[in-house]
Image (spheres, helix red, strand yellow):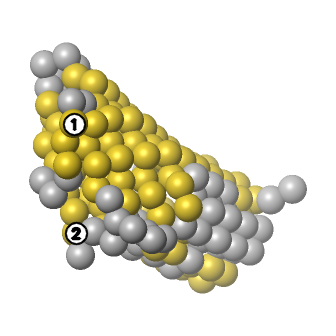
Amino acid sequence: MGASLQQRGSARLEGNYPALETVELKTANGKSALLLDANCPALQNLELEQVSGSLKGKLAGEYVQLQTLKAGAVSGRLSLSLPGAYPALTAFNLNTVSGKAALDLSGDFQGEICGAIHTVSGQTELKIPRRMAATLTGNFLTGRMKAEGFTRSGNTYTHEVPEAPAAFKIKARGVSGNIEVQLTE
């Protein structure tokens, strides 16, 4: 059985953690941060929860087993950056109630990655590398989704890239919140 890290507040992991399979970071208020710049070959699940204040996370390095990523925030600011390599990631969930959330998927991915974004109110920003294919389907009550550089047909936004190393299939739902999707280099 692998190891698990459950932390309240901030966490910084650098070095080697060969048996670490799960990281859970939960914050109640104030500023907190998660920095993973480590060798975690067994890491499969990452979960971040924030109640208020700000939570800034960065997952640098290579995470060959990471399959699921879940992040949620009630209020304040949630910012998560994935600049590393994630060849096994198949799903991510980002749930926010209010405030601002940002998810930067600028790393290296492979295959199909299914994502779900749900926002009640506030602003969510999603960054996807231009070299990746992406299809976003949005369903909003009074909010909206904006995706420059995508082809729009009804509630579906598409960014086609022949022979892309990965394809994001994302379903977005919102009440009065807005989601902005940006293509990055």
Q: Is residue 3 visible?
A: yes
- For label 2, count other residues whose C-alpha is less than 10 Å away and answer few (under 14), some (14-19) or many (20+): few
Q: CA distance from mark 1 to mark 2?
A: 22 Å
- Residue beneath label 1, please? 153
- Which quadrant holds the C terminus? bottom left
- For label 1, count other residues whose C-alpha is less than 10 Å away and answer few (under 14), some (14-19) or many (20+): few
Q: Amino acid at mark 1?
A: Ser
Residue at the farthest bottom position: 15
Left or right, residue 63 beside residue 161:
right
Q: Nearer the viewer, residue 144 or 66?
A: 144
Q: Secondary structure at mark 2?
A: strand
Q: Nearer the viewer, residue 34 or 29?
A: 34
Residue ID at (25%, 43%): 157
Q: Amino acid at mark 2?
A: Thr
Left or right, residue 27 beside residue 125:
right
Residue ID at (47%, 64%): 166
- Residue beneath label 2, please? 184
Residue ID at (42%, 53%): 168
- Work out whether 136 lies above or below 10: above
Q: Residue 152, how many percent across, how many down? A: 19, 42
- Work out whether 43 lies above or below 85: above
Q: Secondary structure at mark 1?
A: strand
- Work out whether 40 lies above or below 175: below
**Closer to the camera: disc 1 or disc 2?**
1
> Between disc 1 and disc 2, whose residue precedes?
1
Left or right, residue 30 beside residue 148:
right
Left or right, residue 124 beside residue 95:
left
Give the image quarter of residue 146: top left
- Work out whether 143 lies above or below 167: above
